[in-house]
Amino acid sequence: MRRAHEARDGSYDGVFWVCVKTTGIFCRPSCSARMPNDENSEYVLSVNDALAEGYRPCKRCRPLEVEGRPPQWVERLLILADDYPDVRLSDSDLKANGFDPVKVRRYFKQHHGVTFHAFNRNRRLGVAAKRIVNGAPLLDVGMQLGYESDSGFRDAFHATFGTTPGRFDASQHVVIDTVSSAVGPLVIGATHRGVCLVEFGDRRALPTKIKYLKTKYDCAVVAGRNKFIDSMVGELDAYFEGTLRRFETPLARSGTPFQRSVWDALLEIPYGQTMSYGELADQLGKPGAQRAVGRANGANRIGIVIPCHRVVQSDGALRGYGGGLWRKQFLLDHERRQVE
C-alpha cells in the first residue's frame, strides 16, 4: 500500500485509503497532496474505518465523493470473467492477463466479502444452476464449466447448494450481484420470489446479512442475476437519476411481525420527507417505543428501497445508519432536491 501511495496509483482508489496522523485527514491513494512520512501514515480498508478513527475527508481528493463504479481494472477483470464463464481463472491466469493476484484478492474481500476465486466459482455454479433449470443435460453442464468428471461437478455443486444437480430447482438458492451506484457499490440479492437484499458493499455487517439469508432460506447464496435483480437495477438507476420515487420490484422480506410493521410504515413516509423515531412509534400505536423502532430500522436488509434513511431524531439530527451518516445525508439531500 505504501508503494501504491508513493506511485499515486489511481487503480488502488477504492481498495484502501491513506490516513495522515499529523493532519487528521484521509485520502485516496492517488491524492496529489504532499506525501507524509511512513510513520505518519496509516492505511485502512474502508471509509468507515477512517471515519471511526476520527479522520476527516481530504478536501483535495474528496474520498467521500463516490464515482459509483468499480475501478477500471476491476471492470476489465469482470469482463474477462464474462468472456470466459466456463473457465477457472487461476492466479497464473490473472498474472498472464496483467492482474496482481494479491491486489485482486484484497479488493474482492473488501467489496464482496470473498476472494475473487470464490466469487468466480460461485458465479460459475450460478451459471450451472440457471442452465439446469432451463433443462440442459447435467453432464453437459459440468463439462462446459470445466469439470473433468461428473462426480467432481456433483461434489462442487453439492458443496455450494446443499443438494445434487439432479434435485436442484430455482427456489433453492439466493442470487446476488454487485452493481455501481451514486453512493458506491450496492449488493443486491434476490430469491425466486423477489429482492431480499439491497446493501452497501463496504458495510462490515454485509457478511452477517448474507449468512442470515443462507440460514433463513436454508439455501446457498451465489453470484448471479434473475429478473428481480434486473428490475431493481433499473429502478435504482432511475432513482438516482431523480425520475423514480417509489420502487415497484417485488420484495421478499423476512422479519418479525413488529419489524414488518415498521418496514411497512417506512414505505409510507413520503419521498423527500422525514419522520422521527417517536413519530413512527406513535403512528404504529406504540408510543415510547423509539428504541424498538430504531432496532427494526437497523434490521432492514433492503436499504434505500425500504427507506430507513428517512427516519431522524426529533430535532432533525441524523442518527445511526449502517451505510454511514454521509450516505444518509446524501440520500436525503438527493430526494429533497427532486421535490424542491
Image (cartoon, rainbow, N blue to C red):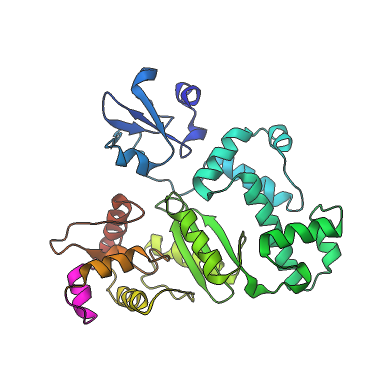
Q: Nearer the viewer, residue 338 or 315?
A: 315
Instruction: Give the residue displayed 53% in from the left and 49% down from the top.
Output: 113
Q: Report the number of numbered marks.
A: 0
Residue 95 lies in what quarter of the image?
A: top right
Q: Nearer the viewer, residue 20 or 113?
A: 113
Task: Give the residues in magenta.
Answer: 272-287
Quadrant where the image shows the C terminus: bottom left
Above or below, comparing residue 300 to residue 120 in the picture: below
Which residue is at 66% across, 56% downward? 123
Write the residue at 55% across / 77% down.
193
- Residue at 38%, 28% (x, y): give it: 42
The single residue placed furthest to the left in the displayed view is 315
Residue 85 is a magenta residue:
no
Instruction: List the single residue furthest toward the bottom.
Output: 285
Indicate the position of residue 79 as horizontal and vertical percent values: 65, 47
Q: Is residue 3 left or right of residue 146?
A: left
| Residue 36 visible in image | no
For this orientation, the residue located farthest to the top is 37
The spot of residue 106 in percent (x, y) is 54, 38
- Is residue 284 something that shows in the picture? yes
- Identify whether 149 is placed above or below 100: below
Depth check, front residue: 48 or 69: 48
Q: Position of residue 320 (x, y in %)?
A: 27, 56
